[in-house]
Image: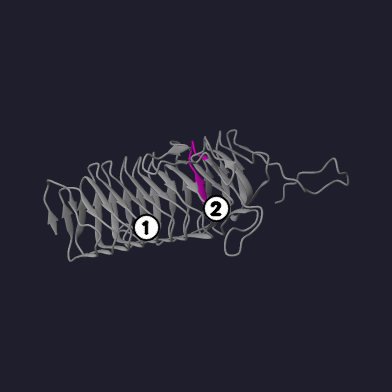
Amino acid sequence: MTIGGGSPVNFGNANVRVNGGFQAGSSVTFGNGTIAIGSGTVSLTGTNQIGNGNLAINAVLSLGGGSSLTIGAGSHAFQSISIGGGAWMKAGAGDVDVIAGIAVGGDSTLALGAGNYRFGPDGSARAVALSGSGILIMEDGAFSANGSIVTEGGSRLIFGRTVNHQINGHLKVAGSVLFGAGRYTIAGDLVNGTGGTTWPYTSSITGMTYGNALEGVSTSGFDQAGINVTFILSGTLNLSGGAKTKLIAAATGTTGGVIGSVLIDSATSAATNWAAGASNVFSGVVHLPNSDITMSGGSSTLSDGQCFMLVANRIIATGGAAGGSACVGLPSSGSSSSGTIELVN
């Protein structure tokens, strides 16, 4: 279906089914009802709305040129989503299925309501790709990505809370990211390659401010932050120069979710690098028993008065790198007023 430029088109409250693609040269409004669009491309311009109801688009949904799309509550299924050129899309509560990847370009936003998220890969095995200043906001709900998540500098990525976030690929962040509480099971590396945008951030699309605090703990000033989280990796955690990371493990475990006091666990033998200029606050156990960890000059990994424990095959600190912790319950010398700190090798 093709709609030429001119006056806005309003389909009213109705079930609408379109065989093939949908091209609109003017703003379009669908009311409440079931919307199903077949294969091809769905391209929208101007200000567009879809009401409450189930939505299925078996095509590439493309928004650009400052256009917008507001979707109500209901299940939302797409072949793929491509948003760029200052465009934005906001969806209400409901499950979101995207078969072949999400791409958000610069100065563009995708904001999704609470629900279960299932994202498949694009042709480059990426489930999510955010360009510089691209933004993806998700609320609470089960999360799975059958592909890597890759972001560029200046972008923002927000995960909601759920028991277990599953990522079948790498999570490589070059912008900023907020990790909602829960476990993150990642079949690859976790990389903070940033040094750019930090939290908090106020979205003009949702009207909300993100990143002042998580779970009652301040995360302001960090670019990668998660509170009450556990990361189970098949790869390792690499931190680039300038990265500002705050990750706090949960004090107790949750069935199928976080593991009490465990922040990061991986059996990989690949090298781990925390580069010069990285500034980290970690609380919990970082368990990388087979990996050599290199902390380069100027990097710091502290615990902000909490307990941080690092288990590695070998720890290499060079050029003024710093690490510190404040753990209670270390082996005592028999007096309640003193104790010993031990290096175990």
Can you name the residue that lies furthest to the front here?
13
Kindly report the distance in space between the C-alpha atoms of the residues bearing marks 1 and 2. Answer: 24 Å
Q: Residue at x 35, y 59 (%)?
A: 125
In reply to whether residue 318 is colored magenta, the answer given is no
Q: Residue 329: x percent and y percent? A: 77, 48
Q: Which mark identifies residue 181?
A: 2
Q: Residue at x 35, y 43 (%)?
A: 134
Q: Earlier in the sequence, mark 1 or mark 2?
A: 1
Quadrant of the snapshot with the N terminus: bottom left
Query: In which image quadrant can residue 205 be found?
Result: top left
Query: In which image quadrant can residue 320 be found?
Result: top right
Q: Nearer the viewer, mark 1 or mark 2?
A: 1
Q: Nearer the viewer, residue 217 or 262?
A: 217
Q: Residue 296: x percent and y percent? A: 55, 38
Q: Residue at x 47, y 48 (%)?
A: 191
- Does residue 166 appear to the left or right of 313 in the view shown? left
**What residue does disc 1 label?**
73
